[in-house]
Image (cartoon, rainbow, N blue to C red):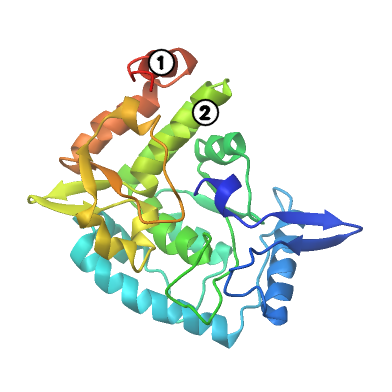
Amino acid sequence: MFEEGQLYAPVTRQDGEVTVHLSADHPGVADPEYRARRNAIAEAALDWRAGEPLPLIDYTDEEHEVWQVVCRELWAKHQRLAPREVVGAGEQLGLPTDHIPQLTEVNELLAPHTGFRYQPAAGLVPLAEFYGSLADGAFWSTQYIRHASFPLYTPEPDVIHEVIGHATTLASPRLAALYRAAGGAARRCSSPEALEFVSKVFWFSLEFGTLRENGNPKAYGAGLLSSYGEIEEFVGADLRPLDIPLMGTMTYDITHYQPVLFCGESLEHVEDVVGGFFEGADDALVERLMALIPAS
C-alpha cells in the first residue's frame, strides 16, 4: 500500500451515510455517478467483517473496459521491464484480462501459489493493521477503479494497483515471503518510529523496488508494476545500492515519480538485504539503524 494518510481519499460515515472525499483535482470529482459508486463500494468494505463472504462489486461495462485497456498496456511492459520472477508469477497467476476480478476470484487464483488472501478496504488502513496482517497472509485491498476518463492514470491506489501490482508479486513464493517477513517485522515493532521505518523499507522495496537482471534494471515493486508511466521512467531515476538505514529514513513525495530508488544486484541480493532486515527487525534494531544516519 502507499502512504495511506497522504494518498488515499478520506472516507467518513455520518448518520449512516458513507462518503469518499475526493480531492478537487480528482478526475471523478465532478461525476455524480462515479462518486455514488465510490461511496457504495466504500460502504461495502466498511460493513465487511472477518469470516463473512467478501463484497461482490457489480462493475459496469465501462469499468471493465478500463481494466482491459490497462491490462493490455501493462502486461506488455512487464515483459520488457519486470524480472523473470515477476513475469513468471504473473503468467502462473493468470489474472483475467477481460474483466475486473472480484477479490474472491483473486483469492482462488492466489491460493495454490502462496496462500495469500485479499480482504476489502475502504481506503485508509492504519499502518500497524495493514502491515501486521501480512504476517498472516492477508492483504487489505481497495475495490474501486479509477475514473474512465483517464484509464492510464490514477491519483490514488485502486484495484488495478492492488491486484495487477500486488497480486502479481504475491503469486511469487519468494516475493510473498518478503511480504510475510515485513508483516512479522511490523508485529515486533511497538514504537511509531520503528513501524514507520519498516513501512519505508517496504515502500522502497515491495512498492518501488528495482533489481538488476543480466545487468539491466528491472522493476519488481507493485507501485512500478501498476504504473503505466513510471514503469517506463524508473530507469532514469537515481538507482542507489540497497541501504537499509537510508531506505528506512528517506522522505519521498508521492505526487511525483520517485527520483531516488534502490536497486538490488539480483533477487537473491534483495532477499538477503531486505528480507534479512525484515526477519530481524524490532524496536532495538531500528533504533541502531536510525543512529547510523547523520542528523541533518
Q: Amino acid at mark 1?
A: Leu
Question: Crowding near pointer 2: few (<14 within 10 Å), some, many (20+)?
Answer: many
Q: Position of residue 233 (x, y in %)?
A: 26, 61
Label 1 secondary element: helix
Q: Is residue 113 above or below residue 291?
A: below
Q: Position of residue 184 (x, y in %)?
A: 48, 29
Q: In the image, is 133 to the left or to the right of 82?
A: right
Q: Earlier in the sequence, mark 2 or mark 1?
A: 2
Q: Nearer the viewer, residue 86 or 156?
A: 156
Residue named by callout 2: 195
Residue drawn at x 36%, y 56% as measured from the top left: 257
Residue named by callout 1: 285
Residue 149: mark: none
Residue drawn at x 17%, y 52% as measured from the top left: 217
Residue 270 is at least partly visible in this image: yes
Residue furthest to the bottom: 61
Q: Position of residue 150 (x, y in %)?
A: 48, 78
Q: In the image, is 142 to the left or to the right of 196?
A: right
How many marks are shown on the rendered structure? Answer: 2
Label 2 secondary element: helix
Residue drawn at x 37%, y 63% as measured from the top left: 93
Q: Which of the 4 image quarters holds residue 250?
A: top left
Q: Nearer the viewer, residue 160 or 95?
A: 160
Q: Position of residue 92 (x, y in %)?
A: 32, 63
Q: Nearer the viewer, residue 255 or 178?
A: 255
Residue furthest to the right: 15
Residue 113 is at least partly visible in this image: no
